[in-house]
Structure formats: structure tokens, C-alpha cells
Amino acid sequence: MRTSTNKIYAYLFLLLIASVFFSPVQAQSDSIRIGESNPPPSKENWNDSKFSIRLRYFLSINKTIVGASTDDNNYSTFSYEDDLNMNRNDYNGLLDFRFHFGKHHYLGLSYYSINRSVNTILEEEIHFRKHDYPANSKIGVHFNASIIRLAYGYSFISNSHFETGAFAGFHVMTFNTGIVLEDQVQGETSTKDNITFTAPLPDAGLFGLYSLNNHWTAGAELGYFYIQYKDLTGRIFDTSLYVQYNLNRHWGFDLGYSYLGVNMNSDKPQLYLDLDWAYNGPFINLTYRFGKKGK
């Protein structure tokens, strides 16, 4: 099922790329037939759109360390990749929408999910939530993360060549992870533990864009936040670097690299929890822009 989803992401992305390349060629041939030439894009076109929709296809190289127990005297942390043999690599899709109002402000909304699972045989005993899972037992493990990002950004400097500013917002993250112990004799599920929790982690940071010419743009973004409230501690760090090629005023492609790291700790008596999750990897974006910024 997961492989089918990855294929759908890839086919959809390739279809969109093909349609983008076809449209400019068709438009150019029409202008030639009527004896007109297409004027070169204005230097301001790369950065003056009011709305943008971005579709991303990316590789996430994951690191996942979790500890969860209802008993602080029986508590252990383990790596999903090293101890449970979960694949580090996963391909995913992301959808992002931005609305620019005025010359200096924008609102952003993005969504993506990373879902991984594995069936494996434990090499050492572990404890998760309420149960012990002995060595040499067959288990099924899943780790799912759904992320909604809300952000407001303000540009200190914004012109046809350069833009830099700051942003603040939330990563609303929903995590679901669990372990199922299979009875090796009867082939039936005997023991299972599952955890689901939502963490609205704030973050703030800086961003910058530089237009090399009418077509090429380089950009970077860096965000960080740390929060400690009662028995909950959370930390988030995210960054991305990319180069964008603008086919025309409306269409553009990005090639880049991103990193997201999340650390959470809860000392609630009903559940002691440690989560250390991070991913990094390359991405490709297809961006469509329309409308024009206000003054």
C-alpha cells in the first residue's frame, strides 16, 4: 500500500512537469503564427505574485528514537532504525499554499505526512508503554507523522533582486506509533501497544531569497524554537536550502535539501515519553504563482 502511494506521488509529479513544459511551447508557437514575439519577463516577475501553490516530492532519511512507559522504573529508549530494522528512507509528497498581502507580508499553510512500518524479529528485549517484548519475538512496528505548518512572514527588504525577513508560526504534529507482538505458535496477535499524541510546537526564524537573473533564484530558510511548560519539553529545528529555476512568471522548479528535527519529553505520571525524530534529504518542487502583490 505504501509503495502504491509513492508511485501515485511520482506519477502525479511527472504529469504536472510534462504539462508545464508543454504549455510554454504551445504558447510560443501560437505567438509565432501571428507574427509576434514573447517579451522577456520583467525583473520583478519572480517575486511579485500574490498567491503560490507548491507541490513537493522529497526523500526523507529518518532517525527515530523513542521511549515510552507508564512506569518510570521500567523505561528504555530504542532506535526504530538500528534496533527495530525500520527502513531509514521514505519518499513523500508535500502541499504548500502561500498568500502575500501587501509588499511585505505573507501567510503560509503546508501539509505532509510520513508513514513507515516494518515487521521484524527483535534481537534484544525492549519495553514499550505497558509491555515487555522479549528477544527473538516477531513484532510489527509503525511510525506515522502528519504535519501541518502555519506561518506568518514579514519581509524587511523586498525588491526585484533580494528579499529577506522573519517568520513565526506553528508545526501542528500528530504522531502515531505502536508495536504489535505476534504469537509465533498460533499466528494471532497477543500483545500490542499504541500511542497517539498531537504537539503544536511553535517556531520562528529567518528566510532569504536572491535573484541571480530573470530565471534563477537561490533561497534559504532557518527556524528554531524551544519550549518548556510544566512536565512537557519540546524543541524543533528546521532548515532548507534551494535553487529555483523560473520558466516564466507563473511556473518554477526548485531543487534543494531540507532538515527537520523534533525532540519532545513528557514526565506525566500516566505516560513517560521521549521522542527524538529527525529527517533530512533532497527535494524537488513544482511551483505555480498567480495574482500580483499589493503595494
Image: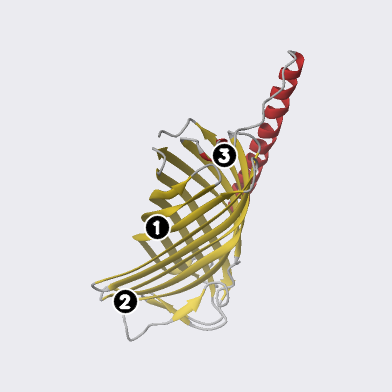
Please say if the residues under marks 1 and 2 sit with CB atoms less than 8 Å apart: no
Q: Are marks 3 and 1 in contact (CB under 8 Å)?
A: no
What kind of element bears circle 3? helix
Query: Identity of the amino acid at label 2?
Result: Thr
Q: Residue at x 39, y 37 (%)?
A: 102
The image shows residue 37 at horizontal and vertical percentages of: 72, 22
Residue that numbered label 1 is attached to: 173
Q: Which residue is mark 2?
A: 70
For numbered disc 1, what is the local secondary structure? strand
In the rendered structure, the answer to whether residue 163 lies left or right of residue 20 reads: left
Q: Is residue 286 left or right of residue 206?
A: right
Which of the numbered marks, if any, corresponds to residue 2? Answer: none
Residue 191, position in %: x, y? Answer: 43, 70
Q: Is residue 38 visible?
A: yes
Q: Is residue 106 above or below residue 78?
A: above
How far is the residue under mark 2 from the one under mark 3? 54 Å
Rendered image quadrant of residue 252: top right
In the drawing, does residue 5 fall left or right of residue 165? right
Residue 166 position in % (x across, y down): 41, 55
Count residues near mark 1 (Cα–Cα under 10 Å), then give few for <14, some for 14-19, many for 20+. some
Amino acid at the residue labelled 1: Met
Residue at 59 percent across and 37 percent down: it is 43
Report the residue marked by disc 3. Answer: 46
SS at mark 2 in the image: loop
Q: Label 3 sits on what residue type?
A: Trp
Query: Is 255 placed above or below 55 here?
Result: below
Single out the mark in the foreground, 3 or 1.
3
- Find residue 118 and report its image quarter: bottom right
Name the residue furthest top. Answer: 34
Q: Nearer the viewer, mark 2 or mark 3?
A: 3
Q: Earlier in the sequence, mark 2 or mark 3?
A: 3
